[in-house]
Amino acid sequence: MSKITNKIQSLKKTRLEAIITTEQEELLQKAALIQGRSLTDFIVFAVTEVAQAVIEENNTITLSKQDSELLVRKILESPLPSKKLQQAASEYKQLMNQK
């Protein structure tokens, strides 16, 4: 497919329906009006913002100060490689130099 075809397909729209209370609709209408948006535009914008935040939060690991200090300490105090690991690394380097 061409780049133009891919771009057109990425712009295709889909429909999403939701059943909400009258109070929720009034709240959303008021917020949309305040921002100068249509109700649809406001909902899409708001839901997209929340979805991105949820995904980012899920992809972020948060450590306490104590946990982050422990992690750094363990990384810095890591033991030297064993003889077996050193031998494996040496064999790997030799193998890669042969190619």
Image (spheres, rainbow, N blue to C red):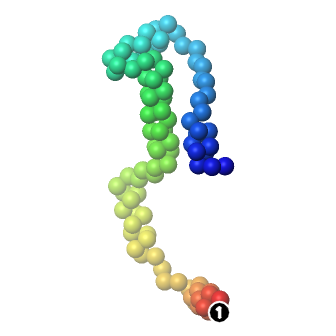
Measured from the top left, where is residue 55 in percent x and y? 50, 42
Asked if 6 appears above or below 73 in the picture, the reply is above
Image vertical order of residue 94 relative to residue 36, above or below: below
Q: Is residue 94 left or right of residue 52?
A: right
Residue farthest top in this picture: 22
x, y percentage for residue 76?
40, 74
Q: Nearer the viewer, residue 1 or 88?
A: 1
Q: Specify the amino acid type for callout 1.
A: Gln
Task: Count neighbours of disc 1 (C-alpha within 10 A) and say few if under 14, some if 14 to 19, many if 20 or more.
Answer: few
Q: Quadrant of residue 35?
A: top left
| Depth check, front residue: 61 or 23 | 23
**Is residue 72 among the parts visible in the rendering?**
yes
- The residue shown at (39%, 20%) is 37
Where does label 1 land, which residue?
Answer: 98
What residue sits 45% from the left and 17% below the top?
39
Name the residue rendered at 53%, 83% in the picture. Answer: 81
Q: Secondary structure at mark 1?
A: helix
Q: Is residue 14 left or right of residue 81?
A: right
- Which x, y percent locates residue 75? 43, 71
